[in-house]
Amino acid sequence: MLRDPMRGARCDEPYIFVKVSHSLRFALRQPPPRPPQILRRRQLADMSDPCVDLPPEVFALVLSLLDARTLSRCRRVSRQWQRAAEDATLWRDLCIRLWADKAYVSPLARQQCDVQPMRAYLESVKDAARSWITEAELCSFAWSFRFKASAGEHFTADDPWWSGHSATTVRFLPDHTLQGCSDDNAGRTLQEGDYQWQFVEKAGLDPDGAEAPPGSCVRVNNFPVYVVFRHKWGFAMQSCWALWTSFPMPRRGEDLELEREARRFGVQLQAAEALRYNLGLHGADVELSHEALQLMLQQMEGDPVDDHEHYGDDFFDDDGSGLL
């Protein structure tokens, strides 16, 4: 009778014990399998490092062909790669290429470009995602303005943009008034004090008028609220009836993407705002029934009513034109 050394019990089957113990001794002699991470490191260690093997100028040329995301990932390879991938010249070139066709770039990012171009690149991308505007920024631009087709033919007929000319130019002043800029094509000037602007907390969008970040909504007089958005990094604002851009607005047909964006923001999104204005209910807290909103949408889907009786005499300038 043999005793099983593993369990301290007798073993009635010597053959089985010998076979099991032999397999166990064989298994113990085998090295444990290496984790995949270790194998991967050894494979990478066996490969030649271009950062070491290539001349510095050649390796820099290779890195200059990468986009910003890939170049940023190269910084994780090693300290040598990090130093090479953070080269100021590489990131300065990336900034130049990225900003070339942008309508607006954060002034802070432009200031950082000469000293810390990588941080400037990241700062500009972060700022481009911002959908709100400060008062200083709002008053610093010469805004281009045009009516949308939903405003009606009475307004689009006199709008220079719809005739293929440059859009009307208007400035928002720090005293919360609007100032029209001279424009040979527009033929329209704003009377001083006729229009007042202010930031509002709600976008006025149906159905619930959700809270919006400060500076994301602008109201002029009692017209439907203008909602701030970004186009090619430039600031733009729109309501169901009008569109503003902080950069020279492309003429009709030159920027189809912007025109499609303007068409998507229609009366259906601001039915309550438009109905309040048309009924003279200028208080933001006035409640409108579901039936009234549906009636408004049915009217807008048909022929637009755009005479003085519909919009109110106080909306029109002396020459019959208005600014929604």
Image (spheres, rainbow, N blue to C red):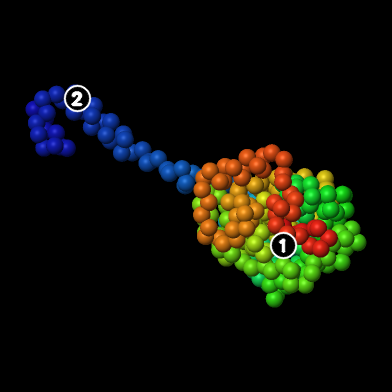
| Residue type beneath disc 2 | Ile
Residue 130 visible in image: no
In this rendering, would 193 be left or right of 252?
A: left
Give percent across and percent down for residue 115: 70, 71
Give percent across and percent down for residue 75: 61, 58
Q: Secondary structure at mark 1?
A: helix
The residue under label 2 is 16
| Residue type beneath disc 1 | Asp
Q: Residue at x 74, y 72 (%)?
A: 193
Residue closer to the observer: 129 or 63: 129
Residue closer to the observer: 71 or 206: 206
Q: Residue at x 70, y 75 (%)?
A: 174
Give percent across and percent down for residue 113: 72, 68
Identify the residue at the far right of this view: 184
Q: Residue at x 83, y 60 (%)?
A: 319
Q: Residue at x 62, y 54 (%)?
A: 279
To which quarter of the image does residue 224 belong?
bottom right
What is the spatial separation of the Cα atoms under label 1 and label 2, in whole angstroms? Answer: 105 Å
Give percent across and percent down for residue 35: 43, 44
Q: Secondary structure at mark 2?
A: helix
Q: Nearer the viewer, mark 1 or mark 2?
A: 1
Q: Please rate how many residues cluster around mark 1, counting C-alpha atoms within 10 Å: few if below 14, some from 14 to 19, many from 20.
A: few
The residue under label 1 is 314
